[in-house]
Amino acid sequence: QVLLAQSGAEVKKPGASVRVSCKVSGDSFTTHNIHWIRQAPGQGLEWMGWVNPNSGVSDSAQRFQGWVTLTRDTSISTAYMELSRLKSNDTAVYYCARGAIGLDYYYGLDVWGQGTTVTVSS
Amino acid sequence: DIQLTQSPSFLSASVGDRVTITCRASQGIRTFLAWYQQKPGKAPNLLIYAASTLQNGVPSRFSGSGSGTEFTLTISSLQPEDFATYYCQQLDSYPRTFGGGTKVEIK
């Protein structure tokens, strides 16, 4: 069974940074890109970006560029999402999800992490 | 960016009802569309990919159709466990945008 296990809830002050981890188990780490999606309280899903676990190449939605950093550590099958210069409206649940490399356009995001709540408050 | 518009945003239905949710794309996305179900406090769960292919383990009462700019998700006979919020996602281009969601509630 493939599992994506995310790190625990975070509370941060405005202007700080947060890093969320996503550890893959039960399958090869290198066959699927890791995508990051967030959901503000009571709102819909917002796609943030993805990272290729082999090359480390990443891309993000334009509104997150320069602000989100997507990385991975293949030695421990873990992907990371770091968001800087946090504001109160970054309060959300952050999800990682996997999509088959080169095929996610067809197969979608088939396994999701449980979500990490990030609260930004002074 | 490709915009996805789901309708309705909310619907109230009874167990046994046939339910249809529509997702319209601002430009053609071929059949590169997925549907997800999300229950309160849980991560989304993939139901359908490539517009009409059922993910393993998803009950056959769920079906998807469409291509280009208009897509539908149908639940043939609504069950108690189907009350949830449903999202479409386009996978034709980046960013991989989602629709605004359709919340299905018990009448």
Image (cartoon, grey):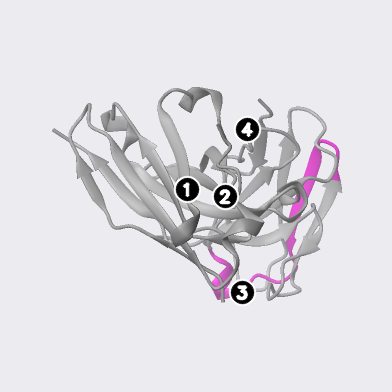
- For the residue labelled by badge 2, is the local secondary structure a helix, a strand or a loop? loop
Residue pointed to by mark 1: A72
Residues B9 and B25: in front is: B25
- The three-letter amino acid code for the residue at tag 1 is Arg
Question: Could you give the CA–CA distance between mark 4 and mark 3, rounded to whole angstroms?
Answer: 33 Å
Do the dots labelled 4 and 2 sit on one chain? no
Residue pointed to by mark 3: B79
Q: Chain of mark 1?
A: A
Name the image quarter holding the N terminus of chain A: bottom right
Of badges 4 and 1, nearer the viewer stands: 1
Residue pointed to by mark 4: B95
Question: Could you give the CA–CA distance between mark 1 and mark 3, rounded to whole angstroms?
Answer: 40 Å
Residue pointed to by mark 2: A53
Mark 2 near mark 3, Cβ–Cβ under 8 Å?
no
- For the residue labelled by badge 4, is the local secondary structure a helix, a strand or a loop? loop
- Residue at image x 74%, y 72%? B61
Mark 1 near mark 2, Cβ–Cβ under 8 Å?
yes
- The three-letter amino acid code for the residue at tag 4 is Pro
